[in-house]
Image (cartoon, helix red, strand yellow):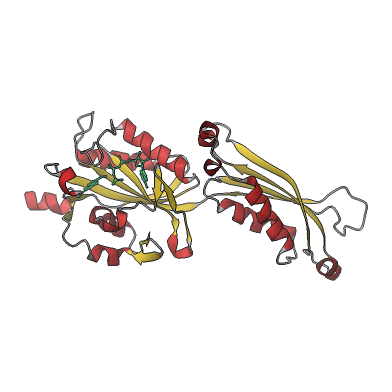
Amino acid sequence: MPGRADEIRLLGVAARGHHGVLDFEKRDGQDFVVDVVMQVDLTAAGRTDDLARTVNYAEVAADVVDVVTGEPYDLIETVASVIADRVLARPLVEHVEVTVHKPQAPVGVPFGDVQVVVRRAKDVPVVIALGANLQGVDGADPDETVREAARRLHRVRGLRGVRVSRLFVTAPVGGEAVVGQPDYVNAVAVGRTRLAPAGLLAQLHRIEDEHGRTRQVRWGARTLDLDLVQYGDPRAGADVTSSVPELLLPHPRAHERAFVLQPWLDVDPDAALRVGEEVVAVPDLLRATADQVVRPLDVTRAADR
Ligand SMILES: Nc1ncnc2c1ncn2[C@@H]1O[C@H](COP(=O)(O)OP(=O)(O)OP(=O)(O)O)[C@@H](O)[C@H]1O
Ligand SMILES: Nc1nc2c(c(=O)[nH]1)N=C(CO)CN2
């Protein structure tokens, strides 16, 4: 999010809890008050007036009460951290600040309030597929376009630790729609992001646009295609699933595409993808795509010599 981020502030949520180091705190309980400040890109919600495009603060308030009234912890630091993790697990929240007030704390002298503040940013593993099969507007060949797009991924603010597979030459997949299309060059990038899924997709679209991508024909030949394959770690049950057409997660066709699976395995031998309710190791998915032609670009070059 460029400039200062949009925020949702939920202040003064009050609930009784049993947190504290002293025995009587655990036994008798006391009042806690919690403030939650969430950074959320509110552009889409403001445009569409749709609750699904934002974070429902009533749900966040219910989470806060759940944690405060739940398992007793010694420290309000722990209470604040547990709340922060719960809030950050919501896909649209990019950063959260949680303040836990304990106004009746046994301090031993008159005092106004004691507060603990924790700040947490999202940090989620993501998988991005790159593909091209037309010369770019700058005359670049598809392999050079994919390399340049990979370099651009390294420069996306909010994406870190980017690692990119080798490049692969792949036969077009898509039946009638791709007949006569030239071969593709494909690769996969993995990294970690603090952006919400829609924010990351917007960055991918920006890179596509910079390479002269137009989006008239579905499955048409293209100068550059960047797909968000997976957001979050499905093995930890911490991936985001989405069925809104602008962003389907995980990518609904990735599991049957050798041009995604092979490069992904190249960059991450432990890769796993959610397919419906199941989480499947990528080598197991690859076995079912043996009819699709995928060759590392360098091998292709050596064979051509
Ligand atoms: N996981 C996703 N990654 C990228 N785009 C997505 C995703 N889910 C939905 N979309 C939407 O799909 C739209 C069309 O994307 P695109 O033109 O790249 O499709 P395609 O590459 O022709 O087909 P495919 O999605 O099968 O690769 C985009 O505008 C985007 O909003
Ligand atoms: N081999 C290959 N085939 C495709 C590809 C692609 O990147 N590689 N992308 C498509 C639509 O995104 C359709 N078919």
The answer to which of 206 and 51 lies nearer the viewer is 51
Q: Position of residue 294 (x, y in %)?
A: 18, 55
In the displayed structure, does residue 265 sit left or right of residue 198? left
Vertical side of 261 occupied by 149: above or below: above
Q: From the viewer's perspective, is 290 left or right of 245?
A: left
| Total labels drawn | 0
Q: Quadrant of residue 64?
A: bottom right
Question: Residue, x 55% and y 31% (percent of image)?
Answer: 3
Most distant residue in the left direction: 305
Q: Residue 154's spot in the image, x, y percent?
A: 39, 43
Q: Position of residue 97 (x, y in %)?
A: 65, 46
The residue at 78%/64% (across/down) is 18
| Residue 192 sits above or below residue 145 on the image | below
Quarter holding residue 293: bottom left
- Looking at the image, the residue that sits furthest to the top is 138
x 44%, y 47%: residue: 160
Can you say whether 257 is above or below 133 in the image?
A: below
Looking at the picture, does residue 217 appear above or below residue 84?
Answer: above
Residue situated in front as seen by the camera: 50 or 10: 50
- Residue 262 lies, in percent from the top left, at 25, 58
Q: Is residue 235 left or right of residue 19?
A: left
> Residue sitting at 63 percent across and 40 percent down?
8
